[in-house]
Image (cartoon, rainbow, N blue to C red):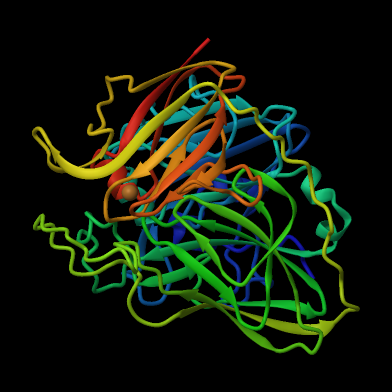
Amino acid sequence: MNRRSFLALAAGGAAAASAAALRHGWAAGPRGSINAAATSLVRSQAGLLEVDLVAQETPIRIPGTSGRALTYNGLLPGPMLELQPGDAVQIQLDNRLNQPTNLHYHGLHIPPSGTADNVFLRVAPGQRQSYKFALPDNHPAGLFYYHPHHHGTVADQVFGGLGGALLVRGDLDRIPEVQAAQEEVLVLKDLPAANERSGSGVMLGREGSILSVNGQVNPELKVAAGGLLRLRLLNASNARFWRLALEGHTMHLIATDGGSLEQPLPLQELLLVPGERADVLVQMASEGGRFRLKNLPYRRLGRPGMGGMGMGMGMGMGRAGSGQGQADVIATVSTNGAVAPQPLPQRLLAVEELPSPPRTRRFVMNHGMAPGMGVAFLINGQSYNHARIDTRVQLGDTEDWELVNTGVMDHPFHLHVNPMQVISRNGRPEPYRAWRDVVLVRAGETVRVRIRFSDFAGKSVYHCHILDHEELGMMGNILIEA
Ligand SMILES: [Cu+2]
């Protein structure tokens, strides 16, 4: 059994067989089984990860969709990149889209400037951009995410299909019980159905009704009965929240966006907001069987018990995200053979406790009217202005940020370059320490996070990761001053 199998659906036709793809030996796999699939994995070799990413519209073979999507190298999701701390990274982005694009290395702790995680780069149609950076020697292990981040086109491009997983190996992978598990990376991506108008629903955030897992609809994943399954989940959606449950099984959360927890946390269901990742272990029932991985309904607009929606803004929101209807089956886990029951790890890795800082800032998220824009999504009453510095922080400082959602929609708050720890939600202390780069702030909620601005000075951004909201103004510039 291929422990590190990973599938990306290869698009048909010659477009998929780009020179870059051939050089790295990617191939289309048989569809239907995650495990049997060909890999589209690109690993660093001798300390260097080198890959070409061609962004373009290509055919895809996902049933129910229009049959076309925006892809990297003809693949949806894009190739999975695997790195070791200390590696040099050289990525050549070739923009064959009809609009500007760029790359964001979501969750990586690397400089926000130059040709690293610089979201202010603009790669025009027909242009190429080379990204070069080094992953720090002490970079935590985890599942990260690359996707476009050109303000003005990011939501369309992510909704259209662009994005891929980026794995950093390290300590977490070497914990014996974790190492013994069968590892599967699942990239969760919704796509518009063939008859779906992809332009509607921007105010709430566009969702597609075709739910794909590694570019497949309801794929099957085979694992030994009694065995330990490590699911590494990435929400690569523009706006959809994925609320996951595996029939008959408890999930044990071992890592969040920024890496390991201190000990496994049992969960009956897992909520994954856009841009968020989670790493869970599942002890497969020793009697074996077939088990549905379900996506349960979630309501992003308003909360039960919070009264009416009270939008009253003529925003035409007839739906409330994936809140209606039944659970969807997004994959099937079936057993194949059996092994002696594998244990869960008791301890994972230490998670540093940050000292309580003297400084607290407040970020209020809501929608409202913005001059010249009409309805906009705002942070502290302002919509995004690329030329304005909204927040200045000192390199090396630790700060608390109070994220306040005074609106009626949930907003997942994302900060680039430096991870955050949730301290409390509505004043209730967070029960465990974890590093995150996306923090859900529900309608009406106040979440306190703690951040240390380490290692890298420069200008970067924070924003709502419902990317339609980011485009409509819910973003700010941060300058980290040395
Ligand atoms: Cu939002």
**For this rendering, which residue is in front, 93 or 276?**
276
Residue 407 x %, y %: 27, 50
Whether residue 264 is situated above or below residue 322 in the rendered picture? above
Q: Quadrant of residue 124?
A: top left
Quick one: 158 or 404, which is closer to the camera? 404
Tell me what residue is drawn at x 82 percent, y 65 percent. 344
Name the spot of residue 108 as percent of width and height, x first: 58, 36
Q: State the residue at coordinates (27%, 67%).
A: 320
Disc tally is 0
Q: Quadrant of the N terminus?
A: bottom right
Q: Residue 392: give x, y in percent of width and height.
A: 41, 17
Answer yes or no: is residue 122 visible: no
Q: Residue 309, position in %: x, y?
A: 21, 63
> For the view shown, which residue lies furthest in the right direction?
340
Tell me the quarter of the picture where residue 122 sits: top left
Whether 156 is drawn above or below 283: the answer is: above
Residue in view at x 23 percent, y 32 percent: 382
Which residue: 68% across, 62% down? 280
Query: Which residue is nearer to you in this view: 220 or 341?
Result: 341
Residue extending farthest to the front is 427
Tell me if residue 45 can be seen: yes
> Does 14 sit above or below residue 379?
below
Determine the residue located farthest toward the top in the rendered image.
482
